[in-house]
């Protein structure tokens, strides 16, 4: 065997790889050159792809903004905490189901006290009750928007992951003595006391004064509004001011560890069924949920909406693909003589095929990147409008680029095959 024919297979593979890379670079360069040579036609073709990708990304980005912030709002409980209340947090069973829920008995203070004694696996049992919404004021300013007032127990702060930035939380002696003290959300404190600390000052809610014991750390905004526009008072004070009749309490239960969360939930369920005298064959007349169950339920509800939006938006991309095929067929006809010359000087069918498929893919990729960029900007208008953190849907961006590649490959294949199968002699005679 001669020395020239005894080269190792690795060297041959390297040469072949280098040749393929060179062909790919040449095909991409020719594709870009063809786009530059027909600017108006290329721009109109790109526009179809841009609109298709934009319509997908803008919908998914806007929905991701709303989803992430609603999930953040739903996920206010601690990792080892679950909530018990009369009605579901997310209700989708229609009017008949809602009427059935409203016929349930309220969760009352005596039931909570019995639960505290019998739920041995629970580390803490917190109670809260929504009391009223109204304007409030201080000697310095008035808060014009409605402030939500809730009655709470000391355990609520840990269960809700509330962090006290100034002063102190509600303590047991406040509840035992039904003191007229309160803890303010950050927004309320800042507006009522713009130039000084709120701790120790007095605020007025529905004509009654409360002394500010503490101020909570800011939690920011969500699509549901300002999370810091509220105040809490001892739950017993709330009962004295607003009464207990017709009011169902919310119970927040903390398990000792994350591993005991499921066991604690089952124990609390059993204890509450016994306290509320629910017959064995009847379903629970209360709801238990954690952060994870709330978020999972929300994602299940919105899945159909997201899938439908993706399908409808993809129709625009399909139309863009048909437009690309049409333009590529026109391009093949216009460049018949060019194809004949390339074949005459040694280009193979494969080279012609790769050239035109690359051109279709490059068109789709450029249009896809522009559409994705504009879609992310357009979708995050929702975030700017509601003053919530913007999002970058990396998964949908990557998916849109992959889809654009497939669109270019699928709709560019037929024109490329037609170009590759041209008779070189006939192509050279074409005028």
Image (cartoon, rainbow, N blue to C red):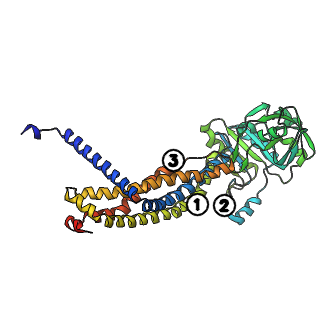
Q: From the viewer's perspective, tell me whether residue 149 is left or right of residue 411.
A: right
Q: From the viewer's perspective, tell me whether residue 349 is left or right of residue 279.
A: left
Between disc 1 and disc 2, whose residue precedes? 2
| Residue at 78% across, 41% down | 187
Q: Nearer the viewer, residue 366 or 225?
A: 366
Q: In the image, residue 326 lies at what x, y percent?
A: 39, 67
Circles 1, 2 touching at the beta carbon (< 8 Å): no
Q: Which residue corresponds to mark 3?
A: 394
Q: How far apart are the alpha carbons under marks 1 and 2?
A: 14 Å
- Mark number for residue 305? 1
Q: Is residue 117 visible?
A: no
**Residue density around tag 2, few if under 14, some if 14–19, many if 20 or more, within 10 Å:** few
What SS does tag 2 mark?
loop
Q: Nearer the viewer, residue 128 or 335?
A: 335
What SS does tag 3 mark?
helix
Q: Which residue corresponds to mark 2?
A: 92
| Residue at 68% across, 50% down | 386
Q: Quadrant of the N terminus?
A: top left
């Amino acid at each position: 065997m001669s020395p020239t024919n005894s080269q190792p297979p690795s060297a041959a593979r390297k040469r072949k790889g280098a040749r393929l890379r060179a062909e790919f670079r040449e095909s991409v360069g020719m594709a870009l050159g063809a786009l530059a040579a027909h600017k108006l036609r290329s721009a109109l073709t790109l526009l179809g792809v841009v609109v298709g990708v934009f319509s997908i990304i803008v919908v998914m980005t806007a929905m991701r903004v709303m989803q992430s912030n609603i999930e953040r709002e739903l996920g206010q409980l601690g990792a080892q905490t679950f909530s018990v209340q009369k009605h579901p947090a997310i209700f989708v069973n229609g009017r008949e189901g809602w009427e059935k829920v409203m016929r349930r008995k309220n969760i009352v203070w005596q039931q909570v006290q019995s639960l505290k004694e019998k739920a041995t696996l629970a580390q803490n049992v917190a109670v809260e009750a929504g009391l009223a919404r109204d304007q409030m004021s201080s000697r310095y300013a008035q808060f014009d928007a409605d402030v939500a007032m809730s009655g709470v127990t000391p355990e609520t702060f840990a269960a809700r992951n509330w962090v006290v930035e100034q002063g102190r939380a509600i303590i047991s002696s406040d509840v035992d003595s039904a003191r007229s003290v309160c803890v303010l959300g950050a927004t309320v404190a800042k507006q009522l006391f713009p130039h000084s600390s709120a701790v120790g000052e007095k605020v007025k809610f529905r004509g009654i004064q409360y002394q500010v014991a503490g101020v909570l750390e800011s939690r920011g905004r969500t699509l549901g509004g300002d999370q810091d526009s509220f105040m809490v008072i001892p739950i017993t004070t709330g009962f004295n001011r607003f009464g207990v009749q017709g009011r169902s309490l919310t119970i927040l239960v903390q398990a000792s560890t994350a591993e005991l969360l499921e066991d604690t939930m089952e124990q609390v369920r059993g204890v509450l069924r016994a306290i509320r005298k629910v017959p064995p064959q009847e379903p629970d007349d209360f709801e238990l949920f954690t952060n994870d169950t709330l978020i999972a339920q929300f994602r299940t509800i919105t899945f159909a909406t997201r899938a439908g939006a993706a399908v409808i938006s993809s129709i625009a991309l399909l139309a863009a693909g048909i437009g690309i095929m049409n333009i590529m067929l026109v391009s093949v006809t216009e460049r018949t003589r060019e194809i004949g010359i390339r074949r005459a000087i040694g280009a193979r069918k494969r080279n012609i095929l790769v050239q035109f498929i690359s051109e279709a893919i490059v068109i789709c990729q450029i249009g896809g990147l522009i559409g994705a960029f504009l879609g992310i900007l357009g979708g995050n208008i929702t975030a700017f409008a509601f003053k919530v953190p913007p999002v970058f849907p990396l998964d949908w961006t990557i998916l849109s680029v992959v889809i654009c590649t497939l669109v270019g490959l699928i709709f560019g294949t037929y024109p490329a095959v037609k170009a590759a199968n041209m008779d070189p002699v006939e192509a050279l005679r074409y005028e």
